Image (spheres, rainbow, N blue to C red):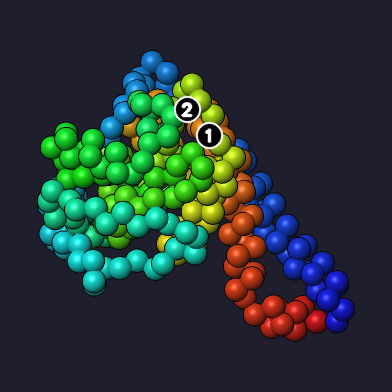
Amino acid sequence: MPMSQMKFYIHALVCCICWLGVLTVAGAEAKPADAAAVQTEAVQAIPDKGKLPSASGKEEMRRYDPAADRSPAEDIPVVETNFSFAEPLLVRPDTKGIVIHHVGMPSGDTSAEAIHKAHLAKGWAGIGYHYVIRKDGTIERGRPLAAVGAHAQGHNFDTVGINVTGNFDTERPTAEQLASLERLLVFLCRIYDIEAGVTTIEGHRDMNATDCPGDNLYRLLPQIRRDVKVQTAEKELEDADIWELLKKDR
């Protein structure tokens, strides 16, 4: 089979997969926040400690061990920060979704280190987000990926928190930030078997009474979800045995 014909089949397969997903979630993308109920929160609440809610019936959670609980390495560059935390971290028992945040105040660029220091100053364990994306697109490590976060009250035990630096009530995310955010989301969706959608990639305001992640980032989430869905399908096809797929198609 000519290479050009094989590429055509692959591209057509990706398009079909992605359009089916878009049609499925299109009606559910719009989730307007109740403007009367929201308030800006520059720093987020810490999670409940020790045990999962009693209704879950799960036993006491295990402490995070850097050696035993190492997560798969990201397929994109992440700056390691090696923060020390004021109290033991816990291992996140499940991962069902990803929550997008902004810093809020201050506006402009903010480092993971600055957020970590601010959270420590509040008397918390340390930075509550798992990742921080700077204005130039650099991704910095916050909490270890396998650890319970402290970024969305009531939802920390099954979500990953990503902070895109800036105040997106007044600013707009840079092209570099958006590109890094999408690449990071594709990685997370793949390793945790998450299908990009309105209930799995959410803004902080979808979970708590806050303006976060700001209107100028929140309004981009529907397109970000669609892009991540397409890129995830393309990645999966790259890793698949293309020759086996073509044999089945004959």
Q: Residues within 10 Å of mark 2 (few under 14, many from 20)?
A: many
Residue shown at 18%/40% (left/top)?
A: 120
Which label belongs to residue 107?
Answer: none
Answer with left or right where residue 69 lies relative to residue 17: left
Residue shown at 19%/53% (left/top)?
A: 84
Q: Position of residue 237 (x, y in %)?
A: 64, 69
Residue shown at 12%/51% (left/top)?
A: 87
Location of residue 41 by image quarter: top left
Secondary structure beneath label 1 = loop
- Amino acid carrying mark 2 in the image: Phe
Contact, mark 1 vs mark 2 (Cβ under 8 Å): yes
Location of residue 80 by image quarter: bottom left
Which of 151/16 is in front?
A: 151
Q: Which residue is mark 1?
A: 173
Q: Quarter of the image for the N terminus: give it.
A: bottom right
Answer with left or right where residue 164 lies relative to residue 246: left
* Above or below: residue 152 compared with residue 42: below
